[in-house]
Image (cartoon, helix red, strand yellow):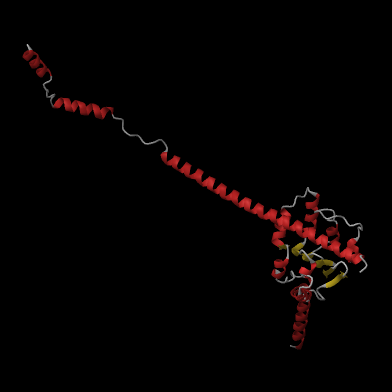
Amino acid sequence: MKRSMKMLVTLLLAWATLYVNVAMAAPPAPIKFPNFEFLSKKATESVTISLDTNTLSIAAGFLDPNDPEDAAAKELVKGLKGIYVRNFTFDDHDDYGSDTQLQSELVTLRSQLKEPDWQQLLAVRNNREQTSSEIYLSVDQGHTNGLVIIDSEPREFTIVNIVGDIDLEKLHRLEGRFGIPKLSAGDALTHCR
Amino acid sequence: MKDDFEDQLRSALRPVDPGNAFCAQVMTRLTASTPSPSPLPGRPAYRWLSAGLVASVAVGICVTWQYQLKRAEGLEARRQLIEALRLTDQKLGSAYRIANSGT
């Protein structure tokens, strides 16, 4: 009886360990975005993009493999589970920079990006230019499976959340495409690592 | 002389009973010359063919409409994906510039 109980406890522990490992290996769920309606009202332009797994696969199906831009995007999208973007453009930084509701919502947002699931990769601020940027990564077994960027510029505020297996090098190779000018340094993302 | 002419005219225009045989002959000829109505060749088949053509056209319109909807949806998803990737790369570049601005 004692022996069978021991075996049962051992089996239960093994199962619990396996369950925890599997749960930790799962990609993080998309972050919960605040309701940015208050920002949309002040913004001159707002962009809301929510592409889940199904929509991503539909979009990838319409990428032309013969077009270099589309082919690069198609390569990057493999393994992604979702892309979510909230982008707002304002006439002036003061339109949103001192918004207390935004700061409060960002505190709530950052509370989702805490260890051990998330690591803050970068947090920089330039008060003179009124810019700041934070990058968070979720890494599992050497693979980046979640990315969050919170970017604040004089007239633009952006949050990006990417869920899935992200290849930052491939993302960097998109520079020069989609109308983005190339940076002078080719290893921009190395600094971000 | 005038009365003689009138008598002759009256006699010529006098109605004459043709008799029953005449009526029977006329009816016989009438029934013999009227063609019997014959049915249109293949009418049921013609009806089915028309219905099939109409159904095919309707199905074709529905399929084409669905295809156009899916295509529009796919192109919109593609546009959003490109925009999302563009913004992501732009913001990563922005982070790099801020990091290198020395602040």
Residue A27 visible within the image? no
Residue A121 visible within the image? yes
Residue A89 figure quarter: bottom right
Front residue of this view, candidates B27 and A171: A171
> Where's the C terminus of chain A, which quadrant?
bottom right
Front residue of this view, candidates A5 and B31: B31
Percent position (x, y) of residue B6? 9, 16
| Left or right, B50 with reference to A3 | left
| Left or right, A173 with reference to B63 | right
Percent position (x, y) of residue B46? 45, 40
What's the residue at 18%, 28% (across, down)? B24
* B81 versus A42 height, above or below: above
What's the residue at 79%, 55% (across, down)? A73
Percent position (x, y) of residue A169? 86, 60
Residue B26 figure quarter: top left
Percent position (x, y) of residue B101? 92, 65
